[in-house]
Image: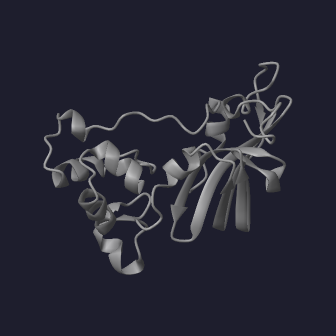
Amino acid sequence: MTARRAGRLPVWERLRAHDRRPLQVEPVQSVALDEVEVVDGDLPQLDGATVFDVWADAGGFQLRAALIRESRAVPFLVRAARLRIEDSDGRLEALLGERRPVATVGELERQACACRGISADAVYGAVARGCRTVDQLKRATRVAFGECQGRRCVPWLAERLELAPDDPRAQLRPRPPLVPVPASILAAFAGTRP
């Protein structure tokens, strides 16, 4: 345990009221930064808001986070050109996969995942590097992490892998966010577009 973590709540305990009261969730605050720093799962630039989702897109990075003060929750949607991660346990890096898969303008007609703009070439590259299941492709490329949660792209992925739809390797395993997130905080993001 590093000195930075000593005496702190574990990251999975940071998104709830300490006395277990229901959270009063404020509207989502959109923040644009040149660079965002994540230290031990938190955003020092936003008073220590805890990150629970992150992804790369053509413009850089987007993060969803929330700051809990007593029973008040302030959700944040952060956009940044650059991302710096310190004192990480590896979960953020795993969510990001590789940054290469974001489709460029010339590849837009060949997208594997329209929600996140992931190119077909990124999927083929991941297969060439050894991905053999839909779940592995999801983790390597971030395909199926979008709004449709794989309903549009998973059948396409299974077909590319030559897997029958009922083959277990053609199915996605449910994956929770980085940390447990109260439904009230997730609901605050319902009207926002990534």
Q: Quadrant of the N terminus?
A: top right
Asked if residue 140 lies left or right of residue 91, the reply is: left
Task: Give 126 or 86, whichever is nearer the viewer.
Answer: 86
| Residue 164 can be seen, yes or no | yes
**Colouring of the image:** one colour
Asked if residue 92 lies left or right of residue 65, the reply is: left
Look at 69% across and 48% down and name the residue there. 87
Look at 71% across and 67% down and name the residue there. 35
Give the x, y percent position of residue 93. Answer: 54, 52
Give the x, y percent position of residue 112. Answer: 31, 60
Task: Give 120 or 82, whichever is nearer the viewer.
Answer: 82
| Quadrant of the rendered image containing residue 119 | bottom left
| Quadrant of the rendered image containing residue 179 | top right
Picture layout, residue 150 above or below residue 167: below
Give the x, y percent position of residue 2. Answer: 75, 40
Q: Quadrant of the C terminus?
A: bottom right
Picture layout, residue 84 above or below residue 163: below
Task: Give 189 or 15, whichever is nearer the viewer.
Answer: 15
Asked if residue 178 lies left or right of residue 6, the reply is: left
| Residue 151 can be seen, yes or no | no
Asked if residue 6 lies left or right of residue 126, the reply is: right
Look at 80% across and 46% down and name the residue there. 48
Picture layout, residue 1 above or below residue 99: above
Give the x, y percent position of residue 11. Answer: 69, 34
Look at 36% across and 34% down and name the residue there. 173
Total numbered badges shown on the rendered structure = 0
Task: Give 107 or 131, whichever is nearer the viewer.
Answer: 131
